[in-house]
Amino acid sequence: MHVTYRRPDTFDYRQLDPEAPDADLDVSQMECEAVPHGIPGWQCTRPTGHPDDEHRAVFGQLGDGPPEAVAIAWTDERTRP
């Protein structure tokens, strides 16, 4: 697994990071749900079968950042779509 983005801890919980990847949220409720190995508490919120191998997880209702902001993004050979 390789982390490609992690939201900086220095941001206010309402602040958006202009360097963050697009959330590419799944509107059909059919999320990929891959999990980053060794980083508990996150799952991919992109659509099932997204066209590349980067998984992304948004804050949602966790409260540690804007709900639709990407908290972490990663690639993982084991979970390639």
Image (cartoon, rainbow, N blue to C red):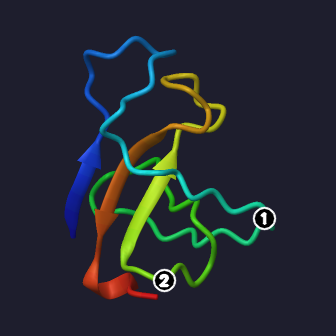
Circle 1: element type = loop
How far apart marks 1 and 2 lie (CA) works out to: 17 Å
Q: Relative to residue 29, is residue 72 drawn left or right?
A: left
Q: Position of residue 11 (x, y in %)?
A: 33, 16
Judge whether 74 appears above or below 57 on screen: below
Location of mark 2 (residue): 51
Q: Earlier in the sequence, mark 1 or mark 2?
A: 1
**Amino acid type, mark 1:** Gln
Q: Nearer the viewer, mark 1 or mark 2?
A: 2
Circle 2: element type = loop
**Amino acid type, mark 2:** Pro
Judge whether 57 appears above or below 14 on screen: below
**Quarter occupied by the N terminus:** bottom left
Residue at the extreme right of the image, as rendered: 28
User: Residue at the spot x=36%, y=32% of the render?
Assistant: 18
> Within the image, what quadrant is residue 6 found in?
top left
Judge whether 19 appears above or below 9 on screen: below
Location of mark 1 (residue): 29
Judge whether 52 appears above or below 21 on screen: below
